[in-house]
Image (cartoon, rainbow, N blue to C red):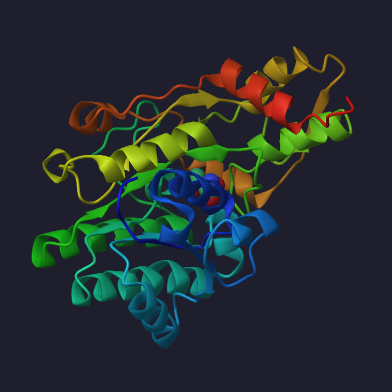
């Protein structure tokens, strides 16, 4: 078993729930410390240590870092695009000052690797929509996107000025069955599965032809651990890497779900504020740098993802 001590901050969220379990299987339960502002689920709590951490509380953060002396920190605590718009000041504070607190402790305590997620939300209305490149015009118009773009610059700055080994991915919308997303614009692509199985119908808050980049959680975890395991020389981009897997619209996803639930119906809500956010984001992402630099490769297309989601969300009695 590899020897590392890892703290995952924001471990109760959509990514954290699965990442902690996977890291524990690689590094051992007791070497991966889950941490969040809320109590975790029973399974996470029993499989290894848990600490209450508020990333904005420096004293609390210092106490946990001094207790475990981690070699790696994954900072996942954030407010996403939709909830960020409801509370812009809190989103900025959490997403920005949380990151800076962790980067400062990492330099001070000589923590060897830091992971911090960015998002396709760093792109904006003037970024190319199709195959959005790694480097292009970036004019995010959500507080979440602004904080992620600024965070990317801080990550590269700490790498260049302090030699901190900080790594990051620009996640697309993430689809998972073990945990629910919270407060994002891409959340419809998870809710649709739950509603299709429970009620046979779903009202989408995004319009029928809104195409967005998406990724199955298995691929997101593979990308995250793949980037963190890559040799430092291969990680040439220290702001954040574009990563991509699939792109689809609510209509296309509905067609795929109907193969398993033929009577499933979808309707569309008018005037949801998340539509404007989705319209400002790319439809597809060019992730050739991640593929070239450290060998990123996705496994799940829409068909495989839908099959796996339906299979896992179905109750055993069905
Ligand atoms: C959101 O919709 O806010 C997130 C993201 C794409 O970063 N899922």
**What residue do we see at 65% from left, 42% from top?**
178
Residue at (52% x, 73% y) in the render: 51
Residue 216 seen: no
Quarter of the rendering occupied by the N terminus? top left
**On the rendered structure, is 269 left or right of 90?**
right
Image-based side of 145 in relation to 187, left or right: left
Residue 98, percent from left and from top: 40, 72
**Vertical order, 233 against 273 (above or below):** above
Q: Position of residue 141 (x, y in %)?
A: 44, 55
Query: Would residue 94 be found to the left or right of residue 237 on screen?
Result: right
- Quadrant occupied by the C terminus: top right
Query: To which quarter of the image does residue 278 belong?
Result: top right
Outermost residue toward the front? 1
The image shows residue 31 at horizontal and vertical percentages of 41, 59
Q: Residue furthest bottom?
A: 59
Please report the residue visible at 77 percent of the width from the left and 36 percent of the height from the top.
194
Q: Position of residue 105 (x, y in %)?
A: 27, 75
Report the label total.
0
Q: Nearer the viewer, residue 243 or 15?
A: 15
Name above or below for residue 88 compared with residue 195. Answer: below
Residue drawn at x 50%, y 75% as measured from the top left: 53
Q: Is residue 176 visible?
A: yes
Image-quadrant location for residue 95: bottom left
125 left or right, relative to 194 = left
Looking at the picture, tell me which residue is in the foreground, 3 or 10: 3
For the residue pair 51 and 147, the one nearer the viewer reads as 51
């Amino acid at each position: 078993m590899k020897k590392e001590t890892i703290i995952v901050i924001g471990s109760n969220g959509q990514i954290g729930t699965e990442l902690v379990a996977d890291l524990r299987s690689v590094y051992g339960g007791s070497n991966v410390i889950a941490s969040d502002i809320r109590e975790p689920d029973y399974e996470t709590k029993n499989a290894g240590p848990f600490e209450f951490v508020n990333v904005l509380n420096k004293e609390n953060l210092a106490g946990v870092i001094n207790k475990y002396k981690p070699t790696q920190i994954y900072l996942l605590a954030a407010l996403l695009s939709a909830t960020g718009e409801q509370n812009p000041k809190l989103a900025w504070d959490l997403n920005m000052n949380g990151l800076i607190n962790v980067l400062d402790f990492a330099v001070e305590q000589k923590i060897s690797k830091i992971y911090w997620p960015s998002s396709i939300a760093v792109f904006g209305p003037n970024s190319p929509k199709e195959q959005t490149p790694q480097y292009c015009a970036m004019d995010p118009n959500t507080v979440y996107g602004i904080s992620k773009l600024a965070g990317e610059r801080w990550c590269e700055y700490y790498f260049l000025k302090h030699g901190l080994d900080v790594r990051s991915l620009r996640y697309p919308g993430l689809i998972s069955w073990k945990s629910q997303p919270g407060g994002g614009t891409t959340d419809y692509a998870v809710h649709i599965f739950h509603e299709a199985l429970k009620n046979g119908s779903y009202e989408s808050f995004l319009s029928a032809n809104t195409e967005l980049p998406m990724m199955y959680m298995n691929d997101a975890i593979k990308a995250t651990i793949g980037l963190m395991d890559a040799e430092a020389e291969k990680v040439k981009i220290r702001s954040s890497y574009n990563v991509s897997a699939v792109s689809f619209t609510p209509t296309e996803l509905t067609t795929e779900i109907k193969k398993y639930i033929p009577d499933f119906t979808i309707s569309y809500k008018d005037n949801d504020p998340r539509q404007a956010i989705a319209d400002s984001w790319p439809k597809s992402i060019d992730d050739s740098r991640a593929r070239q630099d450290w060998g990123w490769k996705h496994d799940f297309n829409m068909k495989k993802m839908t099959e796996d989601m339906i299979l896992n969300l179905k109750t055993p009695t069905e």
